[in-house]
Structures are given as C-alpha cells and as structure tokens.
Image (cartoon, grey):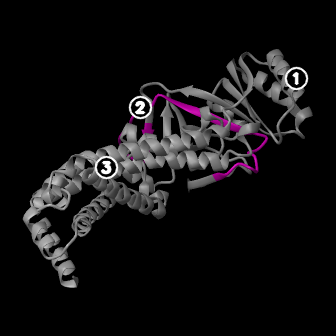
Amino acid sequence: MHRLKTSALVSTISHMINHWTLVTVLILMISVVFLVQLLLSDNLQGLVEKKDESGELMPNTYVCSLLDARKENVYSFISELQEYQDRIDEIIISAEVPLPKKAEISADSDSFYSISSLTLVSFFPKISDRRTFTCSRGNWSFEEMTPGLFFSDELFDLLILEYNVRPDLLADTFFSLSIEGMQWNCTGIGSISSLPPSLQRSFTAVDYRLFFSYSETCDQVSVVFSSPPSETTLLQLNQLAERMLPVKNSFSSVASHENVPIDLFAGIGQTVAVVFLLIINILSLFDYLLSLRTKEFQVYRLSGATIGTIRRYALLELTIVTTLSVLIGGLVSLLPIRPRIEGILFWDVSPLFFMGNAMVLLLITWLGFLFRMTIGKGRTRFSYVNGGKI
C-alpha cells in the first residue's frame, strides 16, 4: 500500500506536467477566485473592526445636519454647550468641501489629477481619549496645534486608485493639494476609530482652530456624550441648536453598532456563497483533467484501492493546484500594480489574514469537489466513482 501511495503521488505530478496547459489555466482561474475572496474578506474585516471599536462611542454619538452654518454661529453654539461639558466627551464639526475640477494633486512630481470633494473634520476641544488614533505615515498630533491636514488611509488610497497618483508616493510623508492658488499640505496619514458613518471613510482632519481657514461653512455637528444622555438633555440640545444654528436635521443617534453582527454574518454568508459558486463552476475543468486519469484509477482499483482512496488521490491533485493558486495570488498582491487590481494592500493587513483566507479557499475547494462527486454532475462522470464499478 505504501508503494501504491508513492506511485500515486509521482503519477499525479507527472499527470500535471504532461497536461501543464490545462493545469496552468486552472491555477490562474482559482487565483482569480482567491483575489476576489481577499477583496470580500477585507470588507468583512472592516465590519469586525467597526464592531470592536464602536462599542463605547457610537451609541452615545448624536449628529445634527446643518445648512451652511457660519463660523460665528458654530462657535457660539459650542460655547453654549459648556454647561454640559461634564457630560460631553467631544464635539465634532465637519464640512463637505467641494473641489474644482482642475484641483491639482502633487508630490514632487509633474503630474496633476482631479478629485471631487473632501470631508473636513475637526474635534473640540480635543479628540476623545476613548477614540483610537493611528498615524501610519507622517507626523501628526491632536495634542497640540499641528499645521497642515491629516488624511485618512482610505482617502489616500482613493487618490492612488482613482486619480493615478504614482504608487511610489507611498514612500513619501508629505504631499499637497493646490486649489485655486491655495496650498493644502498633508502632513499625516492614518485612521481614527468610531467616527459617525458619514465621516468614516474619506475624511480629512484639521485642528479645530484652523477649520474655518479651509471651509467657510460647517455642514454637520456631532456631539459625543460620555454616557447615554437623557431625553431631557436631548430636548434641550435640539432647542439650543434650533435657536442658534441653521438646522437641516435635528440631533439624532447614529446607527447602532448592534446592527454590525447582522451585517457581519450576512457578509460571511455572501462571501462563502460567491466563492463556492465560482469554485463549483471552475471544477468542471478539473473534472476533465481527472477524466484523463480514468485508466490509471482503474489500475489502482485492481490493485486493491477503494473508492475513498481514489477520491483522496484526486483531492491530492486538487490540493496541489489550489496551493499553487494561493502562491500566485500572493505574488500578485506583492506587485507594484496591486492597488490597481485589488484595491487594498493585503500583506499590510496581516499575514494571518492572508493565511486564513488561503485555508478557507482550500476548504471550500475540497467541499466543492466532494459536492460534484456526490451530488453534482461529477457523480456519474467517471467510472471510478460510479458505485465502485470499473
């Protein structure tokens, strides 16, 4: 039996070499599925991080939409909130800053590109101690007045993906926006946790003392309480806002983080379903490859191999193909063109993220094979799995 197993391994490798064209096509197809799975899984990881980080701040965050509130109105409103300072953790002011079509992005290069708008964000009097702030590139601090802007990782990636900023700018710690003669200097890039949903992605943070130097108006005020406010406090807050601000929508709680687990489980189900369906269809090519080994498997049956043993030999070939596909996907994710193909930096997320997805792909591939061999079209395709007959 040991000799049979050794012979099967050698024969499997020889079969793959002899039909290298079909095997290569199969490997590339599964590699594409793996990249799709990585993309979908990255979105799921974002939901997990959102669930972990928003537990304390999100339920206590209340947002009010404004109609082009001016500096004096906003500062007067914030001053009136001083009587609630023992119950307020932080105040966030924000504005959607439209950019002209000819806005220029430069970073020691001769190329310029256009973007549509930026979401400007400031924290008063300082960012909450319960909020996680990460500066992945550059030099930025909310503890003191820092000149320039702090760009979110998502916005920086957007500039790279959508507006053809050269990938080698990833090595820089500074770039600038030239807007109608005004220079916007970016001195930090990173992330801030648990922001209201409308601010979570492509935000640009600035010291609150410089907010109205970049925007003439404020579109939104968010009040983060240290504990859940009473109905009386919310009523007083809305009455104050109606009296002092051009309110579009009164203060209301942001979407509860309790919905995140539902979204997470739904996302996991969708990811598994998409990958499984893709694999099921791709395995039709693998079925053809196995059909070329029918006589070989008949010899194994005559030598005493069971149907289960034959299936394990087929799984061995599929495992080798899937492993090579994962390696190809890993190499693609390391290429300089990977932001164009994938949109995220997989290896920058976590090696465990990559390895976990590799194991999941292998498991789904095995399940897809067993499905085809027991329920699907592959059940009667080959004589070696047709009820044990030869």
Q: Residue at (22%, 70%) from the top-left corner?
A: 306
Of the numbered discs 1 and 2, the one sitting upstream in the chain is 2
Crowd around label 3: few <14 · some 14–19 · many ≥20 (10 Å) = many
Residue 330: quarter of image: bottom left
Of the numbered discs 1 and 3, the one sitting upstream in the chain is 3
Which callout, 1 or 3, points to the residue nearer the camera? 3
Which callout, 1 or 2, points to the residue nearer the camera? 1
Say which residue label 2 marks.
Answer: 114
User: Can residue 223 be seen in the rendering of this structure?
Assistant: yes
Q: Are marks 3 and 2 in contact (CB under 8 Å)?
A: no
| CA gap, disc 3 and disc 2 | 33 Å
Crowd around label 2: few <14 · some 14–19 · many ≥20 (10 Å) = some
Residue 270: quarter of image: top left
**First to last magenta residue range:** 105-133
The secondary structure type at the circle numbered 2 is loop
Q: Amino acid at mark 1?
A: Gln
Is 327 located above or below residue 82 in the figure?
Answer: below
Q: Residue at (14%, 72%) from the top-left corner?
A: 300
Which callout, 3 or 2, points to the residue nearer the camera? 3
- Does the stretch in magenta take in 113? yes
Query: Which percent across, then down, holds residue 287?
Result: 17, 54
Q: Amino acid at mark 2?
A: Ser
Crowd around label 1: few <14 · some 14–19 · many ≥20 (10 Å) = few
Viewed as shown, does residue 110 lie left or right of 80? left
